[in-house]
Amino acid sequence: MIKAIQNNTESSSQATEMSPRKFTSWQVLLGLTFLILLLIWPQFTTNKFYFTMGTMIALSVIGASSLNLIIRTGHISLAHAAFMGVAAYTCVLSQIYFHINFALACALGCSMSAFLALILGPILLRLTGKYFVLVTFMVGEIIRLVFINWQSLTGGSNGIQEIPRGLDLFKNPTSFYYFSLLISFLCIVFVRRILSSDLGRAIDSLREVESLAECSGIPVSKIKISMFVIACFLVGFQGILQVYLVGYIDPGSFNSEASLNMVVMNVIGGMYHLSGPILGSIFITTLPEFLRGYVDFQRVIFGVVLIVVMAALPGGLMGILFKLKVFLLKALHLEVKNK
Amino acid sequence: MSALLQVNGLSRQFGGLLAVKDLSFDVSAGEILGLIGPNGAGKTTIVNTVSGLIKSTTGEINFDGHNITHLLPHRRAALGLVRTFQSTAVYGVQTVKENAMRGAFLHSYGGFFSDFFSTQKHKILKIQTEQRIDALLDWLGLSQFSNVPAQSLAYGHQKTLGIVIALAAQPKMILLDEPVAGLSAEETDHVRNTIQRVRSQGISVVVIDHNMRFISGLCDRLIVVAQGQKIAQGSPNEVLNDTLVIEAYLGKAYDAS
Amino acid sequence: MFTTDILSQVVINGLSLSAIYILVALGFTLLFGIMKVVNFSHGAFAMLGGYALFISYGSYKLPYIIALFGSAFTVALISLIFEFLVFKWFYQKMFQSMIGLMGLNMAIVYASVMIWDISERSIPSPDQSILTFGELSIPMDRLWIMSVTLVVLGLFWYFVTYSRQGLAMRAASQDLEIAAAQGINPNRIYKLAFFIAIFMTALAGGLYAQTYALSPFMGERPLMVAFIVVILGGMGSIPGAALGGLILGLGESFLSTFYGGAVSSFVSFGSVVILLILRPWGLLGKPE
């Protein structure tokens, strides 16, 4: 895996050069504009489909950015959707069986996911590179099999058709959207804070040259496990809110393809800067809509895009944007010179 | 005065190969010790076991009064035992200053909450660390390269940066793994000078190398290992004239009769 | 429950399953051992082999042996296009290969959905008769699977051990740089290894489709199997693939007959996870 990490160090280096710990004024302006747009557009439409779409995008950002925490430590997890499912099932089932309110059930759900991560983390994170990908792939499958086979509890492959009421604001698509946006925003702020703090610097160190980091006093295992647990806690929110959005649990939505999607959002957007997974999740979630009606064809295109990105663009979309920025700066510089 | 580092009966087995066999040695505070031996003598294994990257099969390691035999590397670093690396000695893609700052983790990280919320205490700690790192870089002549990516430095400077990263952790003792391998004579002199300056600050140094001339000009004491075992120890003069040592490097004298 | 009759059935089923699994796993481990790619699209090629057999044997009714080997050969030949367009960008780049080939898998599977539909088809069996030796009754089609596989494995073993190309392949899997320095052309070896790997996979896919059912999503199981077998036996190890295939095939047959499919899945996945944690290089692999 050291080789693989070093192959990616180029993109990670771009990223760390690209991620100043403070925001530039351009970034603040861009961010604010974007934020305002996100908040205003629901006032101009009543189309329920758009609200569902918007909510799904906001929720998928939670999954992608939380996964980014794990990826930044140098591990690619293909089990993230499975942990999402654990939280969702726990929340719904505890509402059904214990008749508790949504907030408590939600906390329980995310905690269950985090707890599972705490137990599995120390064992799984000892593996590196391809072995970690494979073992998380397998663990994700095992968890999915549990969802399907523990029929008395989970309803088997049919899932759970009747979800108890969540919060009252869930009934209104607009308020659900704003709520999801809020949770998503909080999640991003939290993840971003960790990654840009000194802890984030330690994370970058242990990913780039683990032995050097460890011998400098960085507690590598402890950090990897903590990030894994935090990430699995956060993705619980996506799982729970998604399920309450559609009104039922379908175990098929927590399979390896869903986990792969989250990894792809990170990879395609750019793994070593938080804007990567955000961009990636917007891209991946909206892509199907551009080829509506050609479901199979869009998946073929999706597959081809993956191939191209992995083969030619290790830095993902952010990598392209970065190269573009460098190119533009050079061009402008030339222009100024000629004057 | 008891030794700062005590290694007793250290051995390490890899499958059928006994890479290190019953090795014992001490390092006193303020000393420069050389660990020397031909290639394949087990020097790398020794460094890796003492620094904690590999578990020893048998033996005990004590540092500064603590039994560190079963401690993870980062805990050993916290106690003051830090090492450098022969290859991948630096974070190539990062700037020199960033490299040095990373080495200071132990003393610049005030805990999750003060870091996450960027408390006043954290901010003060950060300023202090930056000042200390700037001074360190200046002291070892790397200030001019502060914003240069480490991998574009000359190899000799990279090795010095590796030492800077170790010093950033404010160690009591540093283990230098082949600090002059691949360096020119001039760069080697520079590293020797750097090590002497480090010792003058009260930090003990263990230099692991196979270059006889470099080590004998630098170290107070030498330990010679061959095939995983200690075959000689003493002052450079004593050791260099030891028959066993000569044999280990050059082989037994050819008997023409 | 554990009567001779049922046990013999379990063993025979297990052996025929093992045969298919070994073929699938061998292809996978070849691609990993020599080119260092983790072929997440492996199942898709098995599926293509299944469709090829469906067309050649099911539709055109060619003689069985010709259909079987011919379709595998054709799929391998056509797949060289994928080698040129996709695989060659990922040689020696393990991490990129994983995600990139997942993309290829998606592309092939859904292209197949577009070409054929998602409905399941079946391929007629070459021989429905049953051979009886006293108490033992062996279905002929199982015998076909086992004998075909044995022949292919035998040829493969002979090739790898005694031919010049086989020697080159073994050298390349150990250390590509040195092999190249010795005059071995990596590109030729890659193409050859790729061809052989896909041939075996497509063949296994045809046999698998005959035993079970054919659909564009048929490859999911063979992919899982490839992972499990190769992890069990050791990634990059050829005898490991054989051993792993045997263990998995017999194990699955035994467990699913007596304890059901769910238990069988849990045990096989669970053992792989445990193995990955304790001994990631597999039973016959080498620690890195």
Image (cartoon, coloured by chain):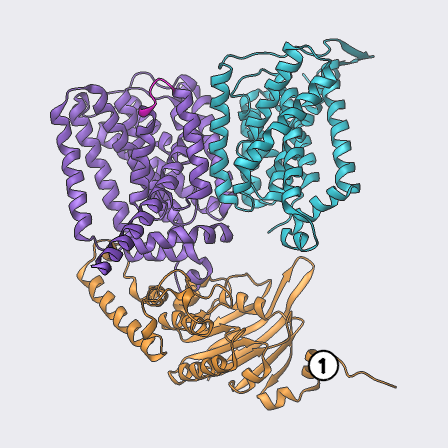
Place residue B242 in its image quadrant: bottom right
Secondary structure state at the residue bearing disc 1: helix
Q: Which residues are magenta?
A: A290-294
Place residue C133 in its image quadrant: top right
Q: Residue furthest right?
A: B257
Residue A136 magenta: no
Q: Residue furthest front?
A: A338
Picture coordinates of residue A44, whole percent (x, y)? 12, 25
Towards the viewer: B21 or B185: B185
- Alpha-carbon neighbours of circle 1 within 10 Å: few (<14), some, or many (≥20)? few
Residue type beneath disc 1: Glu
Picture coordinates of residue B56, whole percent (x, y)? 57, 63
Q: Residue tagged by mark 1?
A: B247
Q: Is residue A124 left or right of residue A35?
A: right
Chain A's colour?
purple
Output the letter for the chain in orange. Answer: B
A256 versus B228 height, above or below: above
Towards the viewer: A131 or A142: A131
Residue A293 magenta: yes
Q: Residue at x 49, y 46 (%)?
A: A129
